[in-house]
Amino acid sequence: MYRITDLQESERPRERLIALGAQALSDAELLAILLRVGVQGENAVQVGRRLLHEFGGLAGIHRASLDEIRNHKGIGQAKAAQIKAAIELGRRLVASSPEDRPTISGPEDAARLVQYDMSALEQEELRVLLLNTRNQVLSIENVYRGSLNSAQVRIGELFRVAIRRNAAAIIVVHNHPSGDPTPSPDDVTITRAIREAGKLLDIPLLDHLVIGHNRYVSLKERGLGF
């Protein structure tokens, strides 16, 4: 069995993290720190690299189930649980910090808050970012889950959470599990309906984002439904 200590000290992920910081390590090296040991013929970094290749990167590992990860050579239940725990901590960090609420100044700010989580979803979800008068995020509400189309979305339900939290504006976000964030005709129809309702309720729709795998599209930027 290959251990991280079998590597030269300058190549050991833990020592490199201490010397250079976590941001200097590759994804495989960060996984190696969690795995600690490799298997016959592979050190921990090589196992991490293989895991990334087989699942299509960190996003693929995020989407995979615990069973799918633990069944890969050299992983097992304990290591799979450590990997899932680390990924969940990352997700919670992105969603936390209510005491210094993130400010939305453009679509990239909104996408940054939800992309890590929503790009891994296996079915469509529609979420609403509720903003105050300074465009700070009050909360992110999950409104719908499942296949979305303009006939399903009840605009009143979507704005109910905004009215309850006294939101000054909203941003709507949903994902395309296919990974392609290209807006559909239904996406444009929904956007137009939400925008018109927001005008009546004096809670403007600032944008509608479609999240794909490592990509997003702003309908506002493309002039679709706005």
Image (spheres, rainbow, N blue to C red):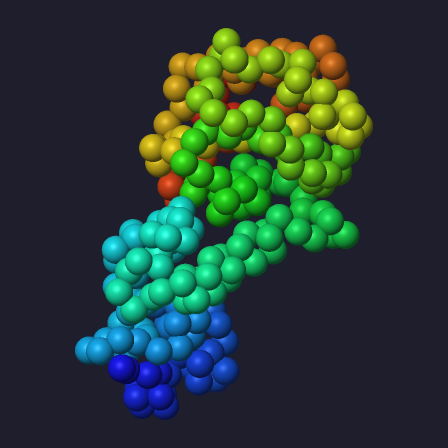
Q: Quadrant of the rendered structure where residue 75 is?
A: bottom left
User: Looking at the image, is 134 positioned above or below residue 148?
Assistant: below
Give how far across and how far down residue 39 sits, in percent. 26, 75
Q: Which residue is painted at 66% across and 17% down in the image?
A: 157
Q: Decide: is 152 above or below 63.
A: above
Res 58 → quadrant:
bottom left
Residue 171 location in percent, x, y?
A: 61, 29
Residue 47, visible in the rendered structure:
yes
On the image, which quarter does residue 74 sit in? bottom left
Tell me the quadrant of the picture where the N terminus can be found: bottom left
User: Residue, x 41% and y 53% (percent of image)?
Assistant: 66
Q: Can residue 224 be seen in this view?
A: no
> With respect to residue 127, does 42 lie above or below?
below
Image coordinates for residue 159, horizontal then vertical, percent: 69, 20
- Quadrant including the C terminus: top right
Looking at the image, residue 138 sits to the left or right of residue 60; the answer is right
Comparing 213 with 131, the one in front is 213
Q: Which residue lies furthest to the left in this view?
A: 41
The residue at the point 47 percent across, 69 percent down is: 23
The image shows residue 122 at horizontal and vertical percentages of 41, 36
Task: Give the number of callouts.
Answer: 0
Q: Which one is nearer the viewer's eye here, 40 or 88?
A: 40
Q: Residue at x 53, y 46 (%)?
A: 112
